[in-house]
Amino acid sequence: MINTLPNILIVEDEPSQLELLSYNLDAEGYNVFRAETGEEALLLLKEYHIDIVILDWMLPDVSGLEVCRQIRHNKDTANLPIIMLTARGEEDDKVRGLNIGANDFVVKPYSIKELIARIRTNLRARHGLETPELLTYANIKIDTARHSVTLNGVKISLGPIEYKLLCVLILSPAYVFSRQKLLERVWGNNIDIETRTVDVHIGRLRKNLRDASNIEMIRTVRGFGYSLDFKF
Ligand code: CA
């Protein structure tokens, strides 16, 4: 089975930390969902399919520990990988967290690189959920390990959003994604983005593909959405 890009939920009440993490994970190709409180995190988990949670221990309302407990007690999320972020040297926290069912711990201040490595390991261990390395459709090839896209064997360069859009579209060729669905898959739950933005980036992607191949590869379903489909 081919999986779509992993959905990652970051639960962190400190805006600058949340921003930094979101930015970096987004750049790594994950679909980022954000929550600033435990309550918000639990609501998002009910609404969306999440593949892994980065959970801050100290939260203003429901504590990270309690969020972790509730995730484990719900049968839909019982096996969801959870990486907890904790303050330096809180060994007791670590023991309590592992007892309650956290999969892994990262101590603040952490290196983003290390956290990303832990995310990969935990996704692989639980679900084999890494994006397959080579995605192909018709004359398009995406090497996700190298973030490189070729068309008829010639490398083309795409912006980061166009790249993510293409990764989502290529996993389900000819499937028509609504603009709302593309928003969720590419931008996560970043509520500041309007569906019009999807049109803008689809327009750029379409132009990139057309310039490189002279073939129309993106189909528009008026008033609804888009698909990757070169035979329409
Ligand atoms: Ca905190």
Image (cartoon, rainbow, N blue to C red):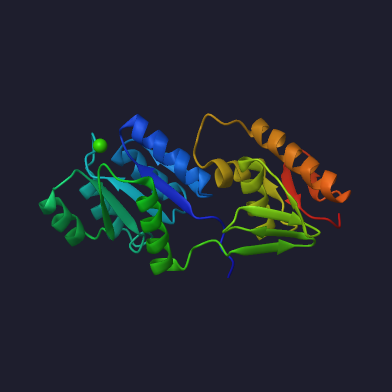
Instruction: Determine the residue located farthest toward the right in the rendered image.
Output: 214
**What residue is rendered at 79% in x and 60% in y?**
139
In front here: 63 or 55?
A: 55
**What residue is rendered at 79% in x and 62% in y?**
138
Quadrant in the rendering for residue 208:
top right
Instruction: Determine the residue located farthest toward the bottom in the rendered image.
Output: 1
Report whether 163 appears left or right of 212.
left
Q: Indicate the position of residue 17 as horizontal and vertical percent values.
A: 34, 35
Q: Is residue 172 visible?
A: no
In front here: 144 or 181?
A: 144
All told, the count of numbered labels is 0
**What residue is rendered at 58% in x and 70% in y?**
1
Q: Indicate the position of residue 150 as horizontal and vertical percent values.
A: 73, 56
Image quarter where the C terminus lies is: bottom right
Q: Indicate the position of residue 74 as horizontal and vertical percent values.
A: 32, 58
Report whether 219 appears left or right of 143.
right
Ligand 1 resides in the quarter of the picture at top left
> Considering only vertical position in the picture, is 81 above or below 158?
below
**What residue is rendered at 23% in x and 40% in y?**
62
> Considering only vertical position in the picture, is 150 above or below 186?
below
Quadrant in the rendering for residue 83:
bottom left
> Considering only vertical position in the picture, is 109 above or below 81?
above
Q: Indicate the position of residue 231 as horizontal and vertical percent values.
A: 86, 58
> Considering only vertical position in the picture, is 58 above or below 217?
above
Report whether 146 appears left or right of 122.
right
Instruction: Determine the residue located farthest toward the left in the rendered image.
Output: 92
Q: Is residue 149 visible?
A: yes
Report whether 138 appears left or right of 130.
right
